[in-house]
Image: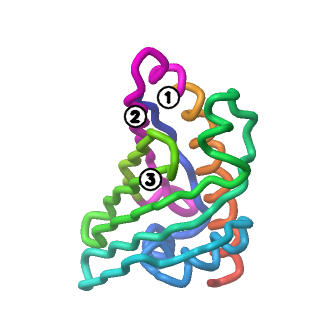
Amino acid sequence: MQTSETQYLDHSAEQVLGLFTTRDYFVQKYERLGATDIRVLDCQDDGDHFTITVFQKVPQNTPLPGFLKKLVGPRIGITQTDRWQRSTRQGQLDVVLQAAPVKVGVALALAEADNGSRLDLTYDIHAPVPLIGGRIEKFLAGDVIARTNTDLDETRKMLAEGL
C-alpha cells in the first residue's frame, strides 16, 4: 500500500538535513519519545551519504486487532535504517517490525520552502500475509503516519532548541 504526505519545518533544508545526518539526533529523539533498549547497530558517513540503523522498543499506542496484539505485545521492537544523500537531499527510511510480518519504506525528499523547508514522504507499507495483508497494511498506514508526525514534532522541538 502506498500513501504520501508533505510536512513543513521552520528551519532551512540545510539545518534539517544537518540534524537528520547526526547520530546523536536519533538517540536523543528516541529517548525523548519514550523508546527503550535503543541501540545504534550501524552508522556510516562518507560526507555525502549518511546511513544509520537503530533498534528500539516503542510503546504500543494504537489499539490493535487481537491477532496482531498477540504478535507484537505492549512494546514493539523496531529496526529502522535511515539513509540520506546530502547532495540531492534525498533519503530513504526502512522499518522492520520485530515479531510482525510488516515492512515499511519511506522515500524522503527535502527542499527549501517559504520560511523553512518541505519534507515530502512517500510511504510503502507491505504486509505479506495471505488473505489479511491488505487489512493489516491499511490499519498500519494510519499508525505509521501518526508516529511519523509525532517524530517530526519532536524534531521541530529539537531544531528550535538548537540541537
Q: Is residue 10 left or right of residue 131?
A: right
Q: Position of residue 115 (x, y in %)?
A: 57, 61
The amino acid pointed to by label 2 is His
**Quadrant of image for the C terminus:** bottom right
Name the secondary structure under disc 1.
helix
Q: Nearer the viewer, residue 45 or 56?
A: 56
Q: Is residue 41 left or right of residue 44?
A: right
In the image, residue 3 above or below residue 107: above
Q: Mark 3, residues whose alpha carbon is within 10 Å: few (<14), some, or many (≥20)?
A: some
The amino acid pointed to by label 1 is Glu
Q: Nearer the viewer, residue 160 or 49?
A: 49
**Quadrant of image for the N terminus:** top left
Q: Residue at x 37, y 78 (%)?
A: 42
Q: Position of residue 133 (x, y in %)?
A: 45, 23
Q: Position of residue 70 (x, y in %)?
A: 66, 38
- The residue singled out by tag 2 in the image is 126
Quarter location, residue 146: top right
Work out which residue is located at the far front of the displayed protein and give it. Answer: 70
In the image, residue 117 above or below residue 54: above
* Residue range (magenta): 111-137
What numbered label is drawn on residue 95? 3
